[in-house]
Image: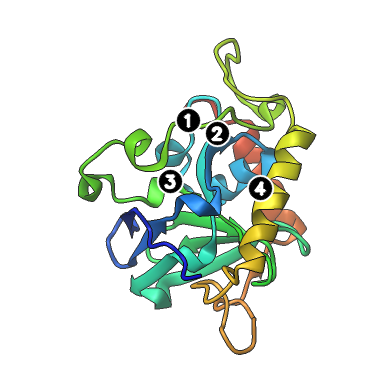
């Protein structure tokens, strides 16, 4: 049976506009929108120097968890960069032209998952709110790493097992449907990342973590 067409799409754009693309919203994929407050997501944004623009008041990064096959980079793919905070860490993708964060993947295209950072969505072009486009955000994860006043924080202390198993089930279903490639992040023939991942040295990681730990609501 042919796969149903997406009901909506949206534009992706880095801050300077050199990298642009689009993504399709396919309800059958079981996508999720939420904020992650973990140390590594915070460190990634601080590595890019974009904390004030991307992180919420508690240090959270909002992501839209979806299948990479739904994402297309139509212009400026030469600006696609990749960093790993540690040798075996996630691949964290960004636009090298202006350090706009784009998303997070595992190190293989065989796993159809990208946590697309919603800050790269061109909200001026969608003509509606993110809630209308992607659905309201779910409860966040890893709230124990959140910064500042947590009294109003809508996040789990960790990532609940039920949420993890649900996400794994969605990934498996996407994989069975062949929704793992093509991916804008991996070469279709070799399966290698399209950009060589930069692995931070211990000194570089300590410097980034120092900035992360001293950050308070957009101020260093």
Q: Residues within 10 Å of mark 3 (few under 14, many from 20)?
A: many
Most extreme residue toward the bottom is 189
**Of 24 and 109, the residue lying toward us:** 24
**Mark 2 — residue?**
60
**Residue at position x 79%, y 36% in the image:** 161
| Mark with earlier residue (3, 4) | 3
Residue 135 in percent (x, y) is at 42, 36
Task: For marks 3 and 4, give the one nearer the viewer.
Answer: 3
Cβ atoms under marks 1 and 2 closer than 8 Å: yes
**Residue at position x 29%, y 51% in the image:** 122
**Mark 3 — residue?**
118
**Mark 4 — residue?**
207
Most extreme residue toward the front is 1
C-alpha span from label 1 to label 4? 21 Å
Cβ atoms under marks 3 and 2 closer than 8 Å: no
Q: Secondary structure at mark 1?
A: loop
Q: Residues within 10 Å of mark 2 (few under 14, many from 20)?
A: many
Q: Secondary structure at mark 2?
A: loop
**Residue 56's disc number:** 1
């Amino acid at each position: 049976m042919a796969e149903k067409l997406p009901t909506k799409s949206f534009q992706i754009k880095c801050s300077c506009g050199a990298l642009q693309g689009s993504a399709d919203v396919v309800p059958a994929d079981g996508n999720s929108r939420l904020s992650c407050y973990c140390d590594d997501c915070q460190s990634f944004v601080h590595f890019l120097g974009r904390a004030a623009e991307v992180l919420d008041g508690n240090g959270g990064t909002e992501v839209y968890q979806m299948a990479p096959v739904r994402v297309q980079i139509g212009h400026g793919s030469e600006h696609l960069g990749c960093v790993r905070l540690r040798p075996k860490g996630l691949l964290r993708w960004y636009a090298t032209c202006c350090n706009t964060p784009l998303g997070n993947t595992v190190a293989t295209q065989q796993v159809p998952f990208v946590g697309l950072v919603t800050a790269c969505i061109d909200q001026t072009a969608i003509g509606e709110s993110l809630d209308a486009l992607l659905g309201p955000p779910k409860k966040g994860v890893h709230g124990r790493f959140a910064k500042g006043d947590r009294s109003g924080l809508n996040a789990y202390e960790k990532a609940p097992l039920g949420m993890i198993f649900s996400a794994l089930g969605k990934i498996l279903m996407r994989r069975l449907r062949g929704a793992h490639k093509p991916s804008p992040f991996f070469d279709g023939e070799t399966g290698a990342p399209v950009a060589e991942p930069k692995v931070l040295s211990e000194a570089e990681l300590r410097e980034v973590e120092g900035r992360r730990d001293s950050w308070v609501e957009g101020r260093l």
